[in-house]
Amino acid sequence: MFDVIGAGGGGGDPRFDAMISIDPNDPCYNFTVGNLKYKEFFSPNYPNDYPNDTECERVIQAPHGYQISIEFRDQFSLEDSPNCAYDYLEIRDGSYGYSTPLAKLCGPDFPRDIRSNDRYLFLRFVSDDSIEYRGFRAVYSFIKMTNERPEPPDECRFNKTGVSGTIENHDIPLELTNYSVTQNVPIDCMWNITVAAGYKMYLNFKEYKLTSPNNCEANYIDIYGEKLSDLARKQRFCGTQAEPVRSDDNHMNIRFFAKPDALSNVQFEITFTAFRELSNKGIFDF
């Protein structure tokens, strides 16, 4: 009884469909898919040295009511560096590249076992342009939670297209807010915005009020481009003001995060408008 995203069971999410369709000859196959029968995954090219300039991702999903445990076996050898700046394995407690970090691993020492707090783990392997090592072998298992929560409603995800539109707190279904409060779990919503190719977009905050301003652990609004990771975040708003933001291309993502006690008086309304930069600097076509 298991469901591994990135190796089957993607549930129609295009991120996961791309993962499971990876070519077996791709260096990332060992990592992104691995050995389903034995619940194993490996650094790229293992047991040979991993290649330079490589980035691989996967998401592991356990059944509802289970946590994920990862154990490293046989070998763990990644280039060592301060703060694991060069080659590393990143593990996050959730299904996205911005989920809460659990570990960033490198060097020659076997890491401790890793356990998720819920049913998802996001993993990313990165190598730089020099010095290869043997890498690692990892085994994962699913462990029944002792305090199982009811299964949550659908993910808080929205897609917006067109030349203009609005993102607001009223988009969030009431059942998601109620679940957050009754189960004492944060609410975490994402709006994906796509405008026509060749255009960029302009975000403007018409209304912005957080329950706990200046408490960036309790509530915030994050702005991303197309890639969803901490490194790719363009802006975080968690104070009393929010400034307009321009995208770099035709994709943008807006994330709203709030702990249960920071949901009572939230109000935000964000408009997006597509524009095209013309050849003369300072001239825009809306």
Image: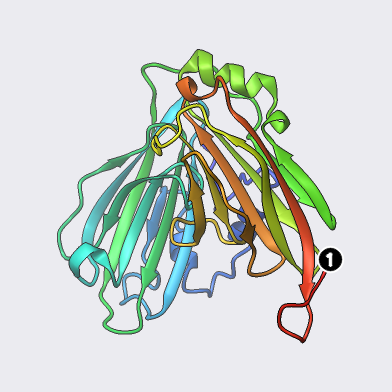
Q: Residue at x 19, y 70 (%)?
A: 81
Residue 120, horizontal then vertical, whole percent: 47, 39
Q: Is residue 280 visible?
A: yes
Tell me the quarter of the image containing the C terminus. bottom right
225 relative position to 67: left or right? right
Residue 161, horizontal then vertical, whole percent: 81, 53
Residue 98, horizontal then vertical, whole percent: 47, 50
- Along the viewing direction, whichever of 100 and 199 lies nearer the viewer: 199
240 relative position to 82: left or right? right
- Along the viewing direction, whichever of 121 and 210 lies nearer the viewer: 210
Q: Residue at x 36, y 51 (%)?
A: 91
Q: What's the residue type where badge 1 is placed? A: Phe
| Residue 51, quarter of the rendered image | bottom left
| Above or below, comparing residue 171 to residue 199 in the picture | above
Q: Residue at x 42, y 59 (%)?
A: 124
23 relative position to 261: left or right? right
| Above or below, comparing residue 78 to residue 146 in the picture | below
| Residue 41, quarter of the rendered image | bottom left
Q: Secondary structure at mark 1?
A: loop
Residue beneath disc 1? 286
- Along the viewing direction, whichever of 106 and 272 lies nearer the viewer: 272
